[in-house]
Image (cartoon, grey):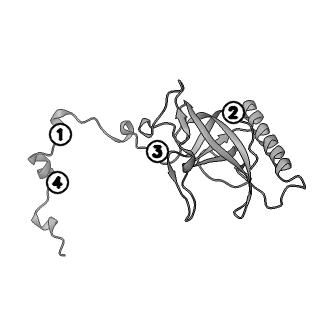
Amino acid sequence: MPTSEIIELKEVRLSFPRLFRAKAFREGQDARFEATFLLDPSNKRHAKMIKEIKATAKALIKEKWPSGKPDNLEYCYGDADKENKKYDGYQGMFYIVTAQPEKNGRPTVCDQNRKPLVEEDGKPYAGCFVNTNITLWTQDNPFGKRIGCNLRIVQFDHDGEAFGVKPADAEEEMDIVKDDDAGIDDEDDDDLDLDDDDWDDDD
């Protein structure tokens, strides 16, 4: 199984991270760690990385299948718009899906100072920006022919707007509770002006 040299991706956006706990997504599949990285083709630095990914894949295809690229070859990367991927942050992006089998160990996850991070640290998270080193590889077996990508290491770089359901903003939705506001007193009950009949659910 030919594997490429390391490709460095800098300040790319993280999506669908499963960095700390491996999971199998279908019956019979080995549990694995996963992460998708988003690159912006309009960013010159990212455009150079995309070009390197495609050139590396092309070289691997030539090495693995010298007689020509298989018609049914699948890729771990692509154009999010052309593939109609409607996830948060994918508009206009190039994406690459990476994975590592649980049996190979958890990928290294660290902060800006290269110190290890654990799940309880709350980062990296979907939507933040990270640095990563990847390698591409070829597959040709009963499960199909494809160009895959190894998930090796992820370094948190800086914050970004989190993907998915966003937490409620306390400053926008709630009032400050003062000490003399806590609890409901008898006068509050009187203001409701309810009698016993109002609590009867048998009507």
Mark 4–mark 3 distance (CA, rounded to whole Å): 35 Å
Amino acid type, mark 2: Glu
Indicate which disc residue 166 carries. Answer: 3
Label 4 neighbour load within 10 Å: few <14, some 14-19, many 20+: few
Q: Which of marks 4 and 3 is in front?
A: 3
Mark 3 lies on a secondary structure that is loop
Q: Upstream in the sequence, badge 3 or badge 1? A: 3
Residue sitting at x 71%, y 35%: 6
- Between discs 2 and 1, the one toward the N terminus: 2
Tell me the tag on residue 8: 2
Mark 2 residue element = strand
- Label 2 or label 1, whichever lies nearer to me, is 2
* Residues under numbered marks 4 and 3 in contact, where contact means CB atoms less than 8 Å apart: no
Work out which residue is located at the far top of the displayed protein and give it.
Answer: 113
Residue 182's disc number: 1
What distance separates the C-alpha of mark 1 from that of mark 4?
Answer: 18 Å
Mark toward the viewer: 2 or 4: 2
Which amino acid is tagged 1? Ala
Circles 1 and 4 in contact, beta carbons < 8 Å: no
Provide residue 109's location: percent of width, then percent of height. Answer: 53, 35
Estimate the x, y position of residue 183 in percent, counting from the top left.
15, 43
Could you classify mark 1 by the number of other residues whose Cα lies within 10 Å: few (under 14), some (14-19), or many (20 or more)?
Answer: few
Residue type, mark 4 in image: Leu
> Hey, which quadrant is residue 9 in on the image?
top right
Q: Mark 4 points at which residue?
A: 192
Q: What element carries label 1?
A: loop
Q: Is residue 151 found left or right of 115 in the rendered image? A: right
